[in-house]
């Protein structure tokens, strides 16, 4: 239990740290990787370079500290992060390393303003926050291990099939190398892939949504090749997977994780919205709905640039054709001349509120969405404007969580 005095110090310093949030966490990462370079095997270097992870970690620590006397209130956020940590293989012994370096960074950035009293209060508070994460994560590790065919950390999988889904997306079908059973997963969940890429000093871990329905004898992931551009470096893992990983190769996979999951108990209409490769968890949901809830109305709305980048087109069209409850609607933002001649899409443009209102009888549905950040923001705002209640809005960010309200 923290003393009322410690709680008061924490609450009064949260706004100060928030102002310096990014400076502190940037310094924190510099110091931590200098003293513990082995952690570069776990952290995503691309996220570090783009500064996205700095913001995510800072926000989470301050949000937790602001609720230090009632961490229960932020349990859903803790669980979401814990899912990510569990899929990455974060261990209790990692927490003191983060704690020590975070405190050192606070001291470094704030200088004399960070008195011993303040630092001691934050050390105590960090201990409480870390314990909360460790215990939630331990529960998740146990659950992953206890599932039939389950496992705790990483397990070797064989790529049994590799198949192109579009000019930029390729699917990998994965079966356990040990020949053992595969635990079920919930549609919408992801796995982590840990890769050793020749020429790279450290291993890389990336999360990919499972893109097929549960209950098959394989897991399927569908990966977009990130070629990079002026502002973005090329994706080391996605490019390696596309260019070098072949059928018969082994990938290290962690057990399915994540709380962006389809509620298959409900019978409300469902709207699945995706932009680009964000369709992968939604295709898993769509297939599950078609198999398990043949009477539940499903509207699958997908936005792609054009037919060249439109992944899984045949699978979705076929599902909509075979299942009366499923309706598919496709938007292209930049249709090719060929697309214009041949059709194969419903509308040119983007997803917005007028489109949703024209396609759906009303806002009484569960909305699930995933895609690039601008797409997520537009959809989120449209749903809010339409008065869709918070509990009917479900979404997943690619990479570090961001805010949809910015
Ligand atoms: C991801 C918070 C401790 C390693 C994240 C994210 C948050 C976060 C908010 C982003 C989640 C998402 O994008 O879904 C925290 C907090 C911690 C903590 C509040 C302490 C109380 C740790 C520790 C480690 C760690 C001890 C391991 C040394 C990671 C990694 C990621 C991550 C590797 C994935 C993102 C990336 O690679 O860029 N954490 N974390 N975290 N965390 Fe933590």
Image (cartoon, helix red, strand yellow):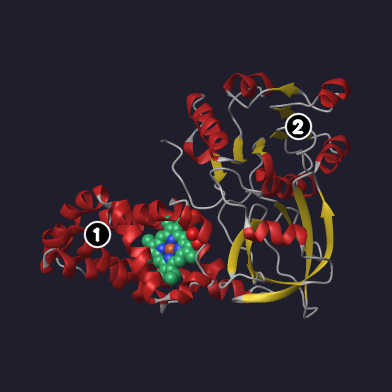
Comparing labels 1 and 2, the label whose residue is closer to the camera: 2
In the picture, residue 78 is in which quadrant?
A: bottom left
Q: Is residue 42 left or right of residue 223?
A: left
The residue nearer to you, when weighing 246 against 269, is: 246
Which residue position is annotated with label 2? 306
* Image position, residue 396 (x, y; %): 56, 47
Q: Residue at x 37, y 76 (%)?
A: 35
Q: CA separation, marks 1 and 2?
A: 51 Å
Q: Which residue is drawn at 15% across and 67% down?
A: 3
Q: Residue at x 49, y 70 (%)?
A: 40
Please, what secondary structure does the residue beneath circle 2 have?
Answer: loop
Q: Is residue 83 left or right of residue 92?
A: right
Vertically, is 180 above or below 269? Answer: below
Q: Dividing the image into 4 quarters, which one contains the N terminus?
A: bottom left
Q: Dividing the image into 4 quarters, which one contains the C terminus?
A: top left
The image quadrant in which ligand 1 is located: bottom left
Q: In this view, does 357 lie to the left or right of 344?
A: left
* Image position, residue 142 (x, y; %): 55, 76
Please, what secondary structure does the residue beneath circle 1 have?
Answer: loop
> What number is the disc on residue 69?
1
Vertically, is 143 above or below 352? Answer: below
Q: Bin the neighbour count of mark 1 within 10 Å (Cα to Cα): few under 14, some 14-19, many 20 and up.
A: some
> In this rendering, does residue 374 appear at all?
yes
């Amino acid at each position: 239990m923290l003393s009322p005095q410690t709680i008061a110090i924490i609450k009064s310093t949260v706004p100060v740290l928030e102002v310096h949030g990014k400076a502190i966490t940037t310094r924190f990462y510099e110091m931590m990787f200098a003293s513990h370079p082995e952690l570069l095997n776990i952290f995503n270097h691309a996220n570090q370079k783009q500064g996205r992870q700095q913001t995510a970690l800072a926000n989470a620590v301050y949000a937790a500290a602001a609720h230090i006397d009632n961490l229960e209130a932020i349990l859903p956020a803790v669980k979401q992060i814990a899912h990510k940590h569990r899929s990455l293989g974060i261990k209790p012994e990692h927490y003191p390393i983060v704690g020590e370096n975070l405190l050192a960074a606070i001291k470094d950035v704030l200088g004399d303003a960070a008195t011993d009293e303040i630092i001691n209060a934050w050390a105590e508070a960090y201990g409480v926050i870390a314990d909360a994460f460790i215990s939630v994560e331990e529960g998740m590790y146990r659950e992953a291990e206890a599932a039939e065919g389950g496992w705790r950390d990483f397990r070797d999988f064989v790529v049994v099939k590799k198949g192109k889904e579009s000019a930029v997306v390729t699917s990998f079908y994965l079966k356990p190398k040990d020949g053992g059973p595969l635990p079920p997963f919930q549609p919408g969940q992801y796995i982590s892939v840990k890769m050793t890429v020749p020429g790279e000093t450290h291993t890389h871990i990336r999360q990919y949504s499972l893109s097929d329905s549960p209950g098959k004898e394989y897991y399927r992931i569908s990966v977009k090749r990130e070629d990079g551009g002026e502002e973005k470096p090329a994706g080391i893992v996605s490019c390696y997977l596309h260019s070098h990983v072949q059928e018969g190769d082994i990938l290290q996979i962690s057990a399915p994780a994540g709380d962006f999951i389809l509620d298959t108990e409900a019978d409300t209409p469902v709207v699945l919205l995706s932009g680009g490769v964000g369709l992968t968890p939604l295709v898993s949901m769509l297939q599950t709905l078609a198999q398990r809830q043949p009477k539940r109305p499903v509207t699958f709305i997908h936005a792609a640039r054009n037919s060249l980048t439109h992944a899984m087109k045949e699978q979705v069209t076929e599902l909509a054709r075979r299942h009366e409850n499923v309706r598919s609607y496709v938007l292209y933002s930049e249709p090719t001349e060929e697309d214009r001649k041949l059709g194969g899409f419903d509308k040119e443009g983007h997803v917005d509120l007028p489109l949703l209102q024209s396609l759906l009888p009303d806002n009484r549905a569960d909305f699930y969405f995933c895609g690039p950040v601008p797409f997520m923001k537009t959809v989120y705002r449209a749903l809010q404007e339409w008065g869709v209640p918070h509990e009917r809005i479900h979404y997943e960010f690619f990479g570090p969580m961001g805010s949809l309200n910015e």
